[in-house]
Image (spheres, grey):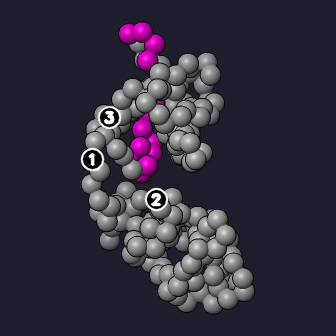
Amino acid sequence: MEKPDNYAVVARITGAHGIKGWVKVHSYTQPAENVFSYKPWRVKLDGRWQEIEADSFRAQGKGNVAHLCGIDDRNEAEALSGLDICVLREQFDALEGGDHYWYQLQGLKVFSVDGDSRVLLGEVAGFLETGANDVLVVKGVTDSIDQKERLIPYVDQFLLKVDTDAGEILVDWDPEF
């Protein structure tokens, strides 16, 4: 059995679509329809990893919808709302040139460089897509200066260094902001 850290979140089921068991799928892949090329999907339901399979899918409005095998009515589809869709990380191609998948950055400690010292801002809790650039959602941890949430643009102007081996990201960001 795989360990949970072998999985990466590629999408989220955001609700039911129609009455025949279809679900709305918010994809984190680029382009969004790539989520359907990863198989099998796994969800954590009732504390256990379970495989699910989309037997049909299509673009719908600004997102995607999918029909999942064995889910044939709206109530069953609604029960899956809010679940993250995960796949084994080994399915991803290696990235070059200092690029990272979001799952590789999740949980890294974020430090702001202030002269020769570093200030712990918190940990990467998630990401936002703004269209112009991605944004790190950094939440304070117990040993940081505070518990506030910071939104730091993931652009070269603020990003100094990403060191996944050390588990940290260095940014040029005012700790008071």
User: Of discs 1 and 3, which sits in the foreground?
Assistant: 1
Q: Earlier in the sequence, mark 1 or mark 3?
A: 1
The residue stretch that appears in magenta: 102-116
Q: Earlier in the sequence, mark 1 or mark 2?
A: 2
Local packing at callout 2 (Cα closer than 10 Å; few below 14, some 14-19, many 20+) is few
Q: Give the residue number, with chain letter if any, for mark 2.
A: 30
Question: What is the C-alpha distance between the residues marked 1 and 2?
Answer: 16 Å
In the picture, the quarter occupied by the N terminus is bottom left
Nearer the observer, 27 or 97:
97
Amino acid type, residue under disc 1 in the picture = Glu
User: Of discs 3 and 2, which sits in the foreground?
Assistant: 2
* Label placed on residue 175: none
Local packing at callout 1 (Cα closer than 10 Å; few below 14, some 14-19, many 20+) is few
Nearer the observer, 132 or 51:
132
Residue 36 seen in render: yes
Question: What is the C-alpha distance between the residues marked 3 and 2?
Answer: 23 Å
Q: Give the residue number, with chain letter if any, for mark 1.
A: 96
Work out whether 177 lies above or below 8.
above
Q: Are marks 3 and 2 in contact (CB under 8 Å)?
A: no
Give the x, y percent position of residue 48: 48, 71
Horizontal arrangement in the rendering, residue 74 relative to residue 164 (left or right): right
- Quarter of the rendering containing residue 67: bottom right
Q: Residue at x 38, y 10 (%)?
A: 116
Work out whether 145 lies above or below 12.
above
Answer whether residue 33 is magenta in the image. Answer: no
Answer whether residue 112 is magenta in the image. Answer: yes
Residue 13 seen in render: no
Amino acid type, residue under disc 2 in the picture = Gln
Q: Give the residue number, with chain letter if any, for mark 3.
A: 163
Question: What is the C-alpha distance between the residues marked 1 and 3?
Answer: 14 Å
